[in-house]
Structure formats: structure tokens, C-alpha cells
Amino acid sequence: MVIRMPKRAATGALLGLALGDSLGCPTEFDDVPAILARCGPWRDMDLPRPALVTDDTQMTLALGRGLRTAMDRGFLAPKRLARPVREEFVDWYRSPENDRAPGRTCLVACALLKEEGRIWQDASRTDSKGCGANMRVAPVGLAPGLTGDQRAGAAQLQSALTHGHPTALAASDLTAHAVHLLAQGAEPTGLVGLLRSYAYDNRTRYHHEWLGDLWTRAHDPSPEHFIARGWDECLDVLARLQDAVRTVSPETDPCLATGAGWIAEEALATGLLCFLLFVDEPLTALRRAACTSGDSDSIACLAGAFAGAHHGADVWPAAWTDRIEYRDELVTLGALWDQ
């Protein structure tokens, strides 16, 4: 009799995210020739020593802690999620470990979130669609027992606490959905098609219960018009991704096909492209993502989350996972959800 061990998708995704973050941190802001000159062949890139991470992993853990607290208190609902996640984001903002060059949008929004009496919608930056919203959303796709509406609402709400642009909301929703599909065993070859169908199905759906009147902070005539702007930008980049998976050479900088990743929809697409180019070689996927001309740490952390959700925890070598920063917390949170 063959005994199949559980793949531990949550642990795999969280470790993969942190590994990609650490691998891509030293190469962020450099072009590919500069990376190759410093690191040598990209397929041989090694994890830095020490294997430190950036705010991408720190905020992923903050969201994970807040989500865990909310779910421990009962059925996941907007107010039950917003308070602990807000508190975790503010704690991160105040922490002395918040020294990894975080993005301006997160800093400005968290400075406003810490003010007593301010509703979170007034702190949200509705003009920002930076990738800081979806590089941290993987826990929402990994948490067990959520309905599709809860997952979508939670993904968009956690984005809106800082990045309230409709494209940030849609890209966060798509990223969590992709992680969830891969963790549940979806075939990577059909993933882009599933994501495009999901985007079309939700194109004009505004989650009033989760987002409240956030849309009124923008200059849109209706909530449906507001959210459709975000889904349309995501659909555009998913079409580019679908073409790129078929035509791009693995030796070419992925950013040239799907964008540099500084903005949410491009981070999603380029992280997915790196994963899909090397589905059966997750370390190669991380290295390709880290050797890019754009936001290399965020691209690589997303590629790592997708690869880890698909393959599970055992795909990552112990020589890397044993020395990644925040390893114990990543493993503890992953194990909780892998049960």
C-alpha cells in the first residue's frame, strides 16, 4: 500500500515566499547585466548569507497573524478581520525591525491607521496600486475553511487598508485565488485560464460588506465602475501573461513580457510567469524571478508562494529553509493551516 503524505501547501507557500524574498532582495533595482556581473550565472544563484528578508515577508506574517486572530474568534467577517490586521500593520510600522526600505504607501497608510478614531477607509491610498498589497496576501489563499466570498472579501480588505486603488484590490484577490487553487491541486497548465474566468466573473462586483464606501474616495460614478477599472487592468496583463507562457524564452528577462512588478497587476503576472516557466524546477523559478530588472524581491516572493503552494513544503532544500529569517514563525503558521 502506498501512503501519500500531505504536501503541506501552506508551509510550502510561506517558506517559498520568504526564500524568494531573500533571494531577490540584493538584486532589486539592478538590471540583468549588473546582476549577472555580480552574481554569475543566474541558474547558480545562492541564498544570501545571512538569509534576511524584506518588508514583503514581514507584512505577510503580520497579515497571517491578524487573520489567525480573526479566525480564532469565529466566523470570518469584515469587522472581525479589519481590527486585528490593522493592529498588526501598525505594530509592524512601529517595530524597530521595520528597517527594510518599505514602500511609501504602506508607511503613509499605517501612520494614519495608528490614529485612534480614524476609520480605515480614510487611511487607504486609493491612488496607489503598488505591489505591497498583493505580495503579502498569500495567507488569505492558504487559510482553510473560507468560502469564496470570504476569501475574495478578505483579500481585498487587507489590500484596502493601505492600497485602495481598484487594481490593487483586484490583483490581491487574484493572487489569493491563484494560491488557493494551487494549494488545492489545480493544474498549473490551466491556471491562467481559470484566473481570467474569475476576473471576468467578478469584473463589476463590488464587495460592499467588506469595503464599505471606499469607492467614494476615488472619482468614479459608481462602485461597479470603480472596481471594473481594476479588473480590466488585471485582465489586460493576464492576456499578456497567457501569450508569454507560450512564447517567452526562459533565458529572457521576464519583466520584458509582463512588466517590472512595481505595480500590483505586473507583480502578479511576472511572478506567475517565473513559476509557470519552471513548474517542475521551483528553485530555478526563484532564481529566474530574482534575476529580473524590476522589483525582484516581490516578483520572487510571489513566484515562491505559487511554487510552494503547488509542490508543498518538502520541495525546498533544508540547507535554505533552515537559515531563512523568521523560519520558526513561518513554519508555525504554515503548520497550523496544514492541519
Image (cartoon, rainbow, N blue to C red):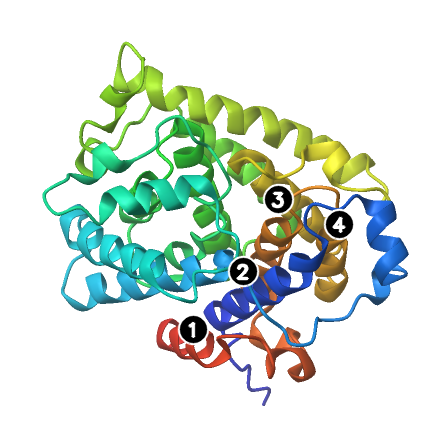
Question: Label 4 to label 2, Cα distance in Å?
Answer: 25 Å
Residue plotted at (33% across, 49% down)? 151
- The residue where tag 2 is placed is 54
> Is 133 on the left-hand or right-hand side of 188?
left
Q: Where is 61 relative to 261, above or below?
A: below
**Residue 334 numbered mark, or none:** 1
Of 88 and 226, the residue lying toward us: 88
Q: Secondary structure at mark 2?
A: loop
Q: Where is 322 relative to 300, above or below?
A: below
Query: Who comes first in sequence, dot 1 or dot 2?
Result: 2
Question: Which amino acid lies under the numbered mark 3 shown in the image of this protein?
Answer: Gly
Question: Which amino acid lies under the numbered mark 4 shown in the image of this protein?
Answer: Leu
Q: Secondary structure at mark 3?
A: helix
Q: Nearer the viewer, mark 2 or mark 3?
A: 2
> Is 310 on the left-hand or right-hand side of 294?
left
Q: Where is 256 relative to 268, above or below?
A: above
Count up the numbered dots: 4
Question: Which amino acid lies under the numbered mark 1 shown in the image of this protein?
Answer: Gly
Q: Nearer the viewer, mark 4 or mark 3?
A: 4
Question: Label 4 to label 1, Cα distance in Å?
Answer: 26 Å
Circles 4 and 2, Cβ within 8 Å, touching? The answer is no
Query: Who comes first in sequence, dot 4 or dot 1?
Result: 4
Residue 24 is situated, as x and y percent measured from the top left of the image, at 67, 57
Outermost residue to the left: 117
Query: Who comes first in sequence, dot 4 or dot 3?
Result: 3
Question: Which amino acid lies under the numbered mark 2 shown in the image of this protein?
Answer: Thr
**Residue 190 numbered mark, or none:** 3
Q: Residues within 10 Å of mark 1 (few under 14, many from 20)?
A: many
Q: Where is 84 relative to 249, above or below?
A: below
Residue 330 is situated, as x and y percent measured from the top left of the image, at 45, 73
